[in-house]
Image (cartoon, rainbow, N blue to C red):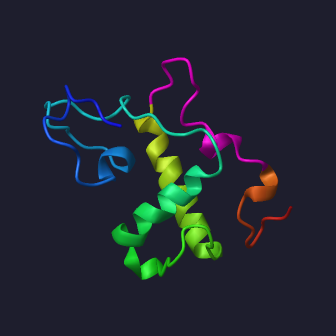
Amino acid sequence: MYNTTAFKDAPTSWSVVFEEQKLPDGKSNKGRVQAYDGPIYIADAALYLMTKQPELGIKDPYELNEAQYAAALELLRKQHPLCSATGTTPTCRCRTSLPRASWPRGPGRSR
């Protein structure tokens, strides 16, 4: 969904959700983005990264290697300041509410 007051025409890229930018109404998208609060949103980030960062080699947003998973989580962490927490549904908490077991493992990280 998108706000038809902010967009005369539908957005053509998911960048309006993941990257800070000025919207067609002349205002920033900061504080105006809402994101799903759940781990499945990692796949949405991975889907965006398939085009934005093809060098990651993401072929399936549901099957990520460790580097791809880390990139998706980093994108979501960077998105967090864009999100609004207003309304009846909590938003943008998936970056901070992911269970520790789902965090990527790597040097210095253990479950």
The N terminus sits in image quarter: top left
Q: Taking 58 as reference, is 109 above or below it?
A: above
The C terminus sits in image quarter: bottom right
Image location (x, y in percent) of residue 29: 30, 35
Q: Foreground: 10 or 92? A: 10
Q: Is residue 87 left or right of residue 103?
A: left
Q: Is residue 33 left or right of residue 36?
A: left
Q: For the point 75% across and 68% down, which residue is it?
A: 105
What secondary structure do most residues of the magenta stretch adopt? loop
Q: Foreground: 80 or 43? A: 43
Q: Is residue 62 left or right of residue 27?
A: right
Q: Foreground: 17 or 73? A: 17
Q: Taking 39 as reference, is 9 above or below it?
A: above
Image location (x, y in percent) of residue 15: 31, 52
Q: Which residues are magenta?
A: 84-99
Image location (x, y in percent) of residue 39: 65, 50
Q: For the point 43% across and 66% down, which residue is it?
A: 49
Q: Taking 2 as reference, is 106 above or below it?
A: below
Quadrant of the rendered structure where residue 67 is? bottom right
Q: Is residue 65 left or right of residue 101?
A: left
Is residue 89 rendered magenta in the image? yes
Is residue 58 rendered magenta in the image? no
Q: For the point 48% across and 56% down, which residue is it?
A: 75
